[in-house]
Amino acid sequence: MTKGPDKALVVLSGGQDSTTCLYWAIDRFGRANVSSITFDYGQKHRIELECARNVAAAAGVPNACLPIDTFAALGGDALTDTSIPVSDEADEETELPVTFVAGRNLIFLTFAAAYAYRHDVRHLVTGVAQTDYSGYPDCRKETMAALQEAITLGMDREFTIHTPLMHRSKKETVELAVQLGALEMLALTHTCYNGRRPPCGDCQACRLRARGFAEAGVRDPLLDIR
């Protein structure tokens, strides 16, 4: 039996990192072999979903959006719970940022694997990174390695989780986007924890993004939108 082409599914949030990863996947696997998946998990800022759709359409790849609103029902974090404001403060009990959504990347990639299983896709691509992040435990290399093994065993099919940004700084991520021809596409993305486009410039996500572009000596195209 002739083996089909390697296909990749990108977890696309509509943000800078996942958009860069989308173009990494296109470069590696070919546009015709790449699709994307977005999760409506009850996030307060619905603009993420619109940005993901727009990025996928502009990149010429399919995008599926799956509803998984359990995170909103659980609450307890600043991205899904309207009673918790976005801040740089850490949760007193967990010592993690209030923007940490417990289990989010674990759930995203498990659902992505289930979707990929039904579409004969073996490669999953995610924008998680240990560098320049807020210490989220589900962004670590060890977490991704353990999850890859779990979904491979649990679905009896070999999956590979690709993390192109795992050890890249924000500066290096911007440089990668330039290298892949994805810079202009970043004007369609959303990063701000306060849900603003153009970005608020004050929240941690905005500051990390701005620092990366500044250190790379590249102007962020998102700043030029009206």
Image: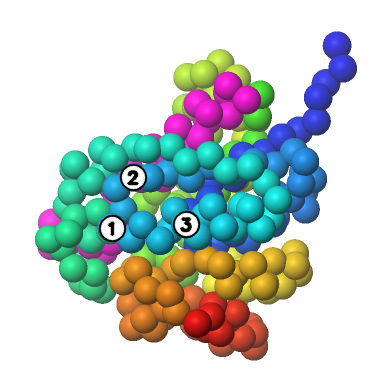
Tell me which amino acid carries mark 2.
Tyr
Q: Position of residue 26 (x, y in %)?
A: 74, 50
Q: Is residue 108 left or right of residue 26?
A: left
In magenta stretch: residue 117: yes
Decide if residue 205 is in sight here.
no
Task: Say which label, 3 or 1, has the lower sequence index.
Answer: 1
In magenta stretch: residue 62: no
Decide if residue 138 is in sight here.
yes
* 201 lies above or below 163: below
* Quarter of the image where one finds residue 216: bottom right
Magenta segment range? 91-119
The residue positioned farthest toward the top in the image shown: 1
Q: Check disc 3 and report the residue beneath it.
A: 50
The residue under the point 42% across, 78% down is 199
Task: Say which label, 2 or 3, has the lower sequence index.
Answer: 2
User: Element under label 3?
Assistant: helix
Q: Residues within 10 Å of mark 2 (few under 14, many from 20)?
A: some
User: From mark 2 to mark 1, how far is it between C-alphas?
Assistant: 9 Å
Between residues 1 and 170, which one lies in front from this camera angle?
1
* 185 lies above or below 39: below
The residue under the point 79% across, 45% down is 30
Do the CB atoms of the residues marked 2 and 1 lie less than 8 Å apart?
A: no
User: Element under label 2?
Assistant: loop
* 55 lies above or below 32: below
The residue under the point 71% across, 35% down is 7
Q: Quadrant of the N terminus?
A: top right
Q: Check disc 1 and report the residue beneath it.
A: 44
Q: Check disc 2 and report the residue beneath it.
A: 41
